[in-house]
Amino acid sequence: MTIWCPSLTGRTGPVFRRIADAIGDSVADGGLPRGARLPPQRDLAHALGVSLNTVTRAYADATARGFVCGEVGRGTYVRDKAPPSTREPAADLARPVTGPIDFSRNLPTPGQAAGALAASLADLAGSNLLASFLDDQTAGGPEHHAAAAAQWLARVGLEARADDIALTNGAQHGILVALLATMRPGDVLLTEALTYAPIKAMAHHLGLRIVPVASEDGVLSPDALEATCGRVAATALYCLPTLHTPTTATMDVDRRTAIAATARRHDLVVIEDDVFGTLPPDRPPPLACLAPERTLYVTSVSKSLAPGLRVGYVHGPPDRMRAVRSAVTLSSWMPPPLMADIASRWILDGTADRLNAVQREEAAARQSMARALIPGESRVADPQGFHVWVPLPPHWHPDVFRMEARARGVKVVVGGAFAIDPSASPHAVRLCLSHESTRARVREGLTVVADLLREGGPRGTLVL
């Protein structure tokens, strides 16, 4: 039986890439029509006189580039619609496509990470590295992990030495590590009045006292920080200067400079959460650049590439990194070596830049929908952010709004979930636009929210 077999004549690069290029060209010129099944990998390998691993890598690369898709047990097929780069991205991560629309989870879009993972795993399968991923790497791991981390931090303007970076299991673990390395039971931790919700649980379990600092325009107020430091002996400040959760605001450079100066005057350790830092193409420098001697900078690839890639980085001054590394060992022993290696490979070979660009493009498209559907006075957002802050009309209590939205098939989070002081809970809800797998579901959910905002109050007998 004759099978489709591409000509590699005149093509350059690794053989697997030449095969993937040929697949793309054949899809474009109709030689491989939409829905056509590609030959089994073993058959094509025999026809081309190459190894099975080479064809496996080629199919994975073609999948990552959107030419084809694979179905377990059925084979590899040409996509029956345009690749995700020109239309909506394929839902590579398993997320519901029916049922309630979930605006409650602040995760990146499904994107194209699954195809990149397939290519990386195929590449690793043919290497001699597999045994090392099952061994202890608490001594620091391969040098390219630290080099990749430094390269990742350079993308946000932070020039870092590899020796001053520790790997963690994502940014949330990085925050816990920073607290363990910096604070003792009974110490005072300053935070914004509205902040990342798990901070409250972390502080409780570590025996820390949280003192909220007032914000202005959605971000930390330098004047309020100065006043709070004048009346409270605090050890550290935790804050989110870029794409703040939940208000979406980004602190300008003047305010960052003022906060760095206040931290220096009052000898505060600054724990800077910059988990969304690679999303904005143009952003102010991190606080770690303005107060490097006292800032523990925390970030990860989970929000910018794929949520299941639990690889984070903590950067700090040399005199604090020993405590940071000890906290990593205490709390998790070490990040999984295979996961760390995948993140490092993607950063060093440019895959991370491509996946991050997909996140930026999709966030911008979904924010554009929000601008079109939700009135400006009812919406605060950054064009490159994942979430929208929605101040509610006086007639809507946040909990009633949340319940009514849920009754109509949309999940949202009330602003009180982020308040350090429950009595100061904001009259608002947060919408996360990135978790849903398709723009159509995002549009449907935003329409429900917009309809609720226009209504005079809840239907029926919803009460608190």
Image (spheres, helix red, strand yellow):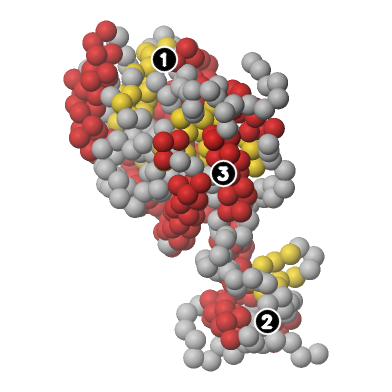
**Secondary structure beneath label 2:** loop
How many marks on residues?
3
Q: Nearer the viewer, residue 357 or 166?
A: 357
The answer to whether 153 is drawn above or below residue 224 in the figure is below
Q: List the residue tagged with mark 1.
A: 210
Residue labelled with disc 2: 33
| Three-letter code, disc 3 | Leu
Task: Tell me what residue is drawn at x 68 percent, y 72 percent.
Answer: 80
**Place of residue 140 in the rendered image (x, y in percent of width and height, measured from the top left):** 44, 42
Q: Secondary structure at mark 3?
A: helix
Query: Can you tell which of label 1 and label 3 is closer to the viewer?
Result: 3
Q: Residue at x 64, y 16 (%)?
A: 464
The mark lying in front, picked from 1 and 2, is 2
Specify the amino acid type for callout 1. Ile
Foreground pick, 237 / 31: 31
Indicate the amino acid at tag 2: Pro
Q: Residue at x 49, y 27 (%)?
A: 393
Q: Give the mark, 1 or 3, whose residue is nearer the N terminus.
A: 1
Q: Earlier in the sequence, mark 1 or mark 2?
A: 2
